[in-house]
Image (cartoon, rainbow, N blue to C red):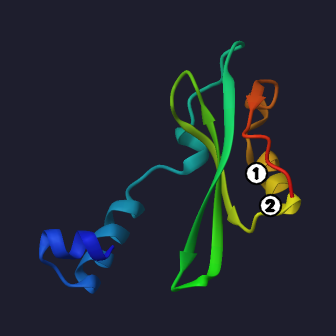
């Protein structure tokens, strides 16, 4: 957000209002996911960031379809098996039959 503020020369409040407007016009996430094909492959991965302070770590977990390069599902949480399970449960049912690959995550 800070980089956008500087490059656009706008206040953080203005940027937040713009983003809220744009996001409110987007279709629901579930309706924007393309239908699965029989040979689709999902890549599951996680990315660490922090909120406010480095001690407040958050992990963004994603399921990415190789064919479409589209995020089929995502979840934000910690780096636990519980969050991994939430990611799996958020994957649309038609994608759950797909072959999946990960970076051999373990707790």
On screen, residue 99 versus residue 41, left or right, reads right
- Quick one: label 2, few (<14), some, or many (20+) residues within 10 Å? some
Q: Quadrant of residue 57?
A: bottom right
Q: How many numbered discs, if any? A: 2
Residue 72: x and y in percent read 62, 39
Tell me if label 2 and label 1 are in contact, CB under 8 Å. yes
Residue 37: x and y in percent read 66, 16
Under circle 2, the secondary element is helix
Picture residue at 71% right of the left edge, 67% below the top: 77
On screen, residue 100 versus residue 40, left or right, reads right
Q: Nearer the viewer, residue 36 or 28?
A: 36
Picture residue at 66% right of the left edge, 23% below the top: 36
Residue 50: x and y in percent read 56, 75
Q: For the C terminus, which image quadrant?
A: bottom right
Find the residue positioned furthest to the left: 9
Residue 94, relative to residue 53: is it above or below? above
Picture residue at 32% right of the left edge, 77% below the top: 16
Residue 25, relative to residue 51: is it above or below? above
Q: Quadrant of residue 100?
A: top right
Picture residue at 76% right of the left edge, 24% below the top: 98
Q: For the N terminus, which image quadrant?
A: bottom left
- What separation in Å lies between label 2 and label 1 (alpha carbons)? 6 Å
Residue 20: x and y in percent read 37, 70
Q: Quadrant of residue 78?
A: bottom right
Q: Nearer the viewer, residue 43 or 31?
A: 43
Q: Nearer the viewer, residue 101 or 8?
A: 101
Rendered image: mark on residue 96: none
Under circle 1, the secondary element is helix
Residue tagged 2: 83
Residue tagged 1: 87
Residue 41, relative to residue 4: is it above or below? above
């Amino acid at each position: 957000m800070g980089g956008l503020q500087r490059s656009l020369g706008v206040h953080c409040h203005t940027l937040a209002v713009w983003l809220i407007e744009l996001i409110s016009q987007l279709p629901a996430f579930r309706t924007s996911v393309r239908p699965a094909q029989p040979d689709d492959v999902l890549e599951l991965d996680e990315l660490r960031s922090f909120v406010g302070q480095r001690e407040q770590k958050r992990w963004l977990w994603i399921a990415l379809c190789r064919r479409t390069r589209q995020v089929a599902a995502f979840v934000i949480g910690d780096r636990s098996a519980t969050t991994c399970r939430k990611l799996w449960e958020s994957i649309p049912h038609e994608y759950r039959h797909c072959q999946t690959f990960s970076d051999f995550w373990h707790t």
